[in-house]
Image: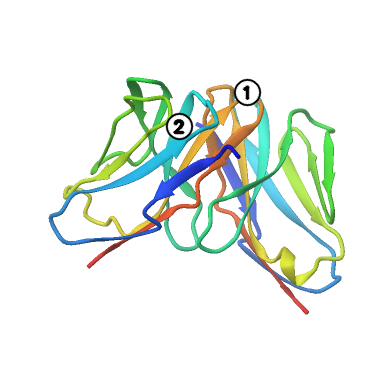
Amino acid sequence: EDQVTQSPEALRLQEGESSSLNCSYTVSGLRGLFWYRQDPGKGPEFLFTLYSAGEEKEKERLKATLTKKESFLHITAPKPEDSATYLCAVDNAGNMLTFGGGTRLMVKP
Amino acid sequence: DGGITQSPKYLFRKEGQNVTLSCEQNLNHDAMYWYRQDPGQGLRLIYYSQIVNDFQKGDIAEGYSVSREKKESFPLTVTSAQKNPTAFYLCASSIWPTGYTFGSGTRLTVV
């Protein structure tokens, strides 16, 4: 059974204080690992897809990396508007995603 | 613009009542999904459909039903058998390698 565990559950940062979110996974055959951002009361918004170990992708202050066991979402010099819940999910080639519980990020000015 | 439309945004259900949540997509995606999200928790799969006229149970299908008569539509009915239906419901569609596109959600409350 595929499993995805995200840590920490919640993270408070000061504006400009860089940090990383972790996504550990076990999957029978990884086809892709996805990162989403979710604002309160809204649907998740796609950020990145990573396909193989060693791959990295960047978007503004966010950088996602992937190893064979985990993925990190690095946030550099965050701003208050980066506050959201970040969700990680894996696709095992069954055309279904298994989601982690999410990390709730709060960035204070 | 292509996307997924969920309606209504807010829905109130009385005890013993069935309610139907609408999900429509114009992305030409074959696969569609329904997820439930409880406060502070991740997404749990209720039902999914890979093609028209076919659907499969997810992890928490009890008390729910779906239909997939058209590629564009995947409505979810929350039946009276679902004892704790208050939650945020998300519909999604997908096509590889784009991943999932989500709707804006329906918040269901039992009154």
Residue in front for this viewpoint, B49 or B72: B72
| Left or right relative to A45: residue B64 | left
Looking at the image, the residue that sits furthest to the left is B16
- Image position, residue B95 (x, y; %): 58, 26
* Residue type beneath disc 2: Met
The reply to whether residue B90 is visible in this rendering is no
Q: In this rendering, which labeled residue sits more in front, label 1 or label 2?
A: 2
Looking at the image, the residue that sits furthest to the front is B1
| Left or right relative to B70: residue A73 | right
- Image position, residue A93 (x, y; %): 58, 22
Relative vertical location of residue A44 with respect to residue B11 in this rendering, above or below: above
- Image position, residue B3 (x, y; %): 55, 40
Q: Residues within 10 Å of mark 2 (few under 14, many from 20)?
A: many
The C terminus of chain B: image quadrant: bottom left
Which chain does tag 2 point to?
A: B
Residue at screen point 23% across, 44% down? B63
Image mark count: 2
Hey, which quadrant is residue B1 in on the image? top right
Do the residues at pointers 1 and 2 share their chain?
Answer: no
Mark 1, residue position: A29
Residue at screen point 53% across, 38% down? A98
Calculate the distance from the C-alpha at mark 1 to the C-alpha at mark 2: 22 Å
Mark 2, residue position: B32
| Left or right relative to B79: residue A81 | right
Relative vertical location of residue A70 with respect to residue A7 in this rendering, above or below: above
Mark 2 secondary-structure assignment: strand
- Image position, residue A51 (x, y; %): 74, 29
Mark 1 secondary-structure assignment: loop
**Tags 1 and 2 in contact by the CB under 8 Å rule?**
no
Which chain does tag 1 point to?
A: A
* Residue type beneath disc 1: Gly
